[in-house]
Image (cartoon, helix red, strand yellow):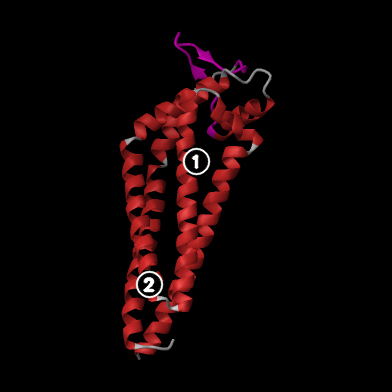
Amino acid sequence: MPQLHAKCFKYCLVALNLVFALLGLIILLLGVWFRFDPRTRSLFEIDENAKRISVGIYVMWAAGSLLLVAGFIGYLSVTRQYRCMIWIYLGFLILLFLIEMGVAIWAFVQKDQVIEQLQTTYAKTAASTTGNVDLQCMINAIHKTLDCCGYVNESGQQAGCSATAQHKDCGRAIEEIINSKLHIFAAVAFGIALVTVLGIILTILFQRSLKSSRVI
């Protein structure tokens, strides 16, 4: 029976580690693509405020790399049954859980500042599209996605939109879309945290099962 339990924990952890590695690779590739793709690269070169957003990209790189490393170490430690590596893997999972909770708390606390930065970045991007095809395409995509156009300038007039029809300004649209999607972010964060906790529990159970079963 202990041997059967150990096998069950082993296969569950192998599947979980493959998921971790895949998620890490996807997040890492998305971060690299968004930072260096010609259509979005100019967004990080507009002003100092826009460059602050690049911190989010670096967080994506770090999170993706950590998930990828955790998946690799977990897969290797479980399949090879290296006790020392299993403890290292458990430490990675605990660190991941703490980071996830920290990022989620930070996102909710800094929500208003993030919205303000995005609104300011959009306004400066919309004002810098002259002669820049990449920025113009990106602004057009934002207008189409958010069903908005332009922004309200310091004079209280709509700017950054050539259309004569009245449109909702994108500053307000950005605020509305973020506020309306908070529950999705919370659900995703909770799901990832739940999977991480499941990994921690399975790792502890697998480590304990090894004491009762030498061969798996």
Residue name at image x 32 percent, y 84 percent: 211
Residue 216: x percent and y percent?
Answer: 44, 86
Decide: is 47 above or below 92: above
Mark whose residue sits in front, 1 or 2: 2
Which one is in front, 124 or 76?
76
- Extreme residue in the top direction: 155
**In the figure, is residue 131 to the left or right of 213?**
right
Dot label at residue 12? none
SS at mark 2? helix
Type of the residue with mark 2 = Cys
Type of the residue with mark 1 = Ile
Residue to which mark 1 is pinned:
57
Residue name at image x 33 percent, y 60 percent: 94
Q: How dense is the environment of label 1, judged by Cα within 10 Å: few (below 14), some, or many (20 and up)?
A: some
- Extreme residue in the bottom direction: 1
Quarter of the figure with residue 41:
top right
SS at mark 1? helix
Quarter of the figure with residue 96:
bottom left
Decide: is 181 above or below 44: below
Residue 177: x percent and y percent?
Answer: 45, 35
Q: Mark 1–mark 2 contact, CB under 8 Å? A: no
Dot label at residue 84? 2
Residue name at image x 60 percent, y 29 percent: 42
**In the figure, is residue 12 to the left or right of 28?**
left
Which one is in front, 214 or 26?
214
Residue 39 on the magenta span? no
For the magenta stretch, what is the residue range? 146-164
Residue name at image x 30 percent, y 37 percent: 109
Say whether residue 167 is visible: no
